[in-house]
């Protein structure tokens, strides 16, 4: 089965840039979606189809996908960006969604 | 506006069967491409996908839980029902239902989640 690998944690100072990786075999050939989850809340879609932003998501959130790594980038990080972030793709062989293990972003 | 809401028992005993209902509005499960999925998240752990039902009534199940899961839909009531048998304390989690618009699309709308505790 397809596996997505994320770093468990990323720390970043306010105003700096956070980059969260999502590794998978030839992930560049798949569409990657990213979710933000704050404590006690349901996940919220922040990036879909690699780099599109839903309405209401700040432009500070961006995504890229190439080769074996997809990346969620958060520019000018704010305290309110502190959350867990999950990447997700669809396994084309099984038609099952696959989630990464999540990355906890800590704002220093 | 699309909304989803999970309902069901907050606590079940080991070996019992859990039944959760997802009641939604703002879309129809008879629309081509649409799917509703169930996911869960044990306390302090990652998201885990459980099952998904499509507008065609086609279904997908997580291989690790397939033998214990059943998903059904009632299009007229705008509901999707998840049944999980032989509950174990390890199944303690927040259970979410979520909307998917079409093939390889994200889960773009989520319910608020419902915490289910498995304990005797």
Image: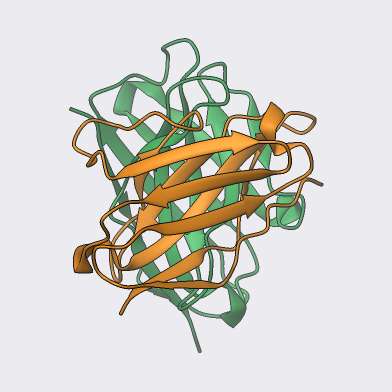
Q: Residue furthest bottom?
A: B120
- Residue occupying image coordinates x 63% and y 24%: B58
Q: Residue furthest front?
A: A16
| Residue B115 left/right relative to A100 | left
- Residue in the foreground of this view, choosing between B114 and B14: B114
Residue B92 visible to an observer of this rendering: yes
Residue B82 visible to an observer of this rendering: no
Image vertical order of residue B87 relative to residue B57, above or below: below
Image vertical order of residue A20 relative to residue A65, above or below: below
Image vertical order of residue B17 relative to residue A31, above or below: below
Which quadrant: the C terminus of chain A?
bottom left
Image-quadrant location for residue B3: top left
Q: Position of residue B54 (x, y in %)?
A: 54, 24
Q: Colour of chain B?
A: green
| Colour orange, chain | A
**Display coloring:** by chain
Number of disc labels: 0
Q: Position of residue B16 (x, y in %)?
A: 57, 71
- Residue occupying image coordinates x 31% and y 62%: A16
- Residue occupying image coordinates x 45% and y 70%: A104
| Residue B48 left/right relative to A55 | right
- Residue occupying image coordinates x 41% and y 12%: B31
Q: Position of residue B92 (x, y in %)?
A: 50, 75
Image vertical order of residue B29 relative to residue A57, above or below: above
Q: Position of residue B12 (x, y in %)?
A: 46, 75
């Amino acid at each position: 089965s397809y596996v997505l690998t994320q770093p468990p944690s990323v720390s970043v100072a306010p105003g700096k840039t956070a980059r969260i990786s999502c590794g998978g075999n030839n992930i560049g050939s798949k569409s990657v979606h990213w979710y933000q989850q704050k404590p006690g809340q349901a996940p919220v879609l922040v990036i879909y189809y690699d780099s599109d932003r839903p309405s209401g998501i700040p432009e500070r959130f961006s995504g890229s996908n190439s080769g074996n790594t997809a990346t969620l980038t958060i520019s000018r990080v704010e305290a309110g960006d502190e959350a867990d972030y999950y990447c997700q793709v669809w396994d084309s062989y099984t038609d099952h969604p696959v989630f990464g293990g999540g990355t906890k972003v800590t704002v220093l | 506006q699309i909304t989803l809401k999970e309902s069901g028992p907050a606590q079940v005993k080991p070996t019992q069967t859990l039944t959760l209902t997802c009641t939604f509005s703002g879309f129809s499960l008879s629309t081509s491409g649409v799917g509703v999925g169930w996911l869960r998240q044990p306390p302090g752990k990652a998201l885990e996908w459980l099952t998904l039902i499509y507008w065609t009534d086609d279904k997908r199940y997580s291989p690790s839980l397939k033998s214990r899961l059943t998903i059904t839909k009632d299009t007229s009531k705008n509901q999707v029902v998840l049944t999980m048998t032989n509950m174990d304390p390890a199944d303690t989690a927040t259970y979410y239902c979520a909307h998917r618009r079409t093939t390889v699309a994200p889960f773009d709308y989520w319910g608020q989640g419902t915490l289910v505790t498995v304990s005797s």
